[in-house]
Amino acid sequence: MNKKQIALIAAGTLVAGTLIWMNSRTYAPQGAVPISPFNPDKYLGKWYEIARTDVRFEKDMIKTSAEYSMNADGSIKVINRGYHSIKKQWSRAEGKAKFRKSPDVAALKVSFFGPFYGGYNVVALDENYQYALIIGRSPEYLWILSRQTVIPEDIKETYLQKAASLGVDIDKLVWPQHSR
């Protein structure tokens, strides 16, 4: 083998190793226990973002929502929408979620960019599937969702306490507007 072939093999090995590592990382922070039993069919449909951590891909977004539907292969189609308050335009992102274990455990991985997945863990959910607390792979990724654009104060406080217990700095949460 010449030096060029060795360099190509080394580069290929590095890329493959990185992809394996990225897909085998932890998908939830310590203490974040996904809801079980979980009913995916009841979770499908439209949810509004009530609060979130300030992540760069949602920076300056208001009127944010997520819509979930079942794909034929058992994965979940994810459509996130929001209005960029600075650019004055709507934005839409389509992704795919897969169950990490079984569909009765609310531990998923979500991708909007090919083979790269991030954690999506439903760690609090009311019995009627109207309000949900989601945490990603770290306390830097958190969402409070509701089927309506508002959430009862008692649910909000309960979810904020749970978020704080998982290491989320709740004082830095973003509360997107949903009114005109």
Image: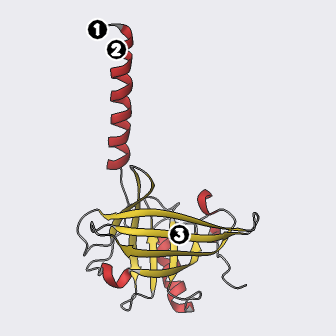
Name the one closer to the observer, 109 or 84. 84
Q: Position of residue 128 (x, y in %)?
A: 38, 92
Q: Residue at x 36, y 90 (%)?
A: 127
Q: Few, some or many C-alpha atoms within 10 Å of disc 2 (few <14, some 14-19, many ≥20)?
A: few
Q: Amino acid at mark 3?
A: Asn
Question: Given contact means CB atoms under 8 Å apart, are the residues at marks 2 and 1 in contact?
Answer: yes
Relative side of 125 to 72, left or right: right
- The residue depicted at 36 percent of the width and 69 percent of the height is 76
Viewer-side residue, 121 vs 90: 90
Q: Residue at x 65, y 76 (%)?
A: 176
Q: Are marks 3 and 1 in contact (CB under 8 Å)?
A: no
Residue 113: x percent and y percent?
46, 52
Instruction: Look at mark 1 in the image and give the residue it sits on.
Output: 1
Q: Amino acid at mark 2?
A: Gln
Give the SS element for disc 3: strand
Residue under circle 3? 80
Residue 5: numbered disc: 2
Q: Secondary structure at mark 1?
A: loop
- Under tag 2, what secondary structure? helix
Crowding around mark 1 (Cα neighbors within 10 Å: few <14, some 14 to 19, many 20+) is few
User: Is residue 80 toward the left or the right of residue 123 in the image?
Assistant: right
Q: Residues within 10 Å of mark 3 (few under 14, many from 20)?
A: some
| Residue 55 shown left or right of residue 18 in the figure | right
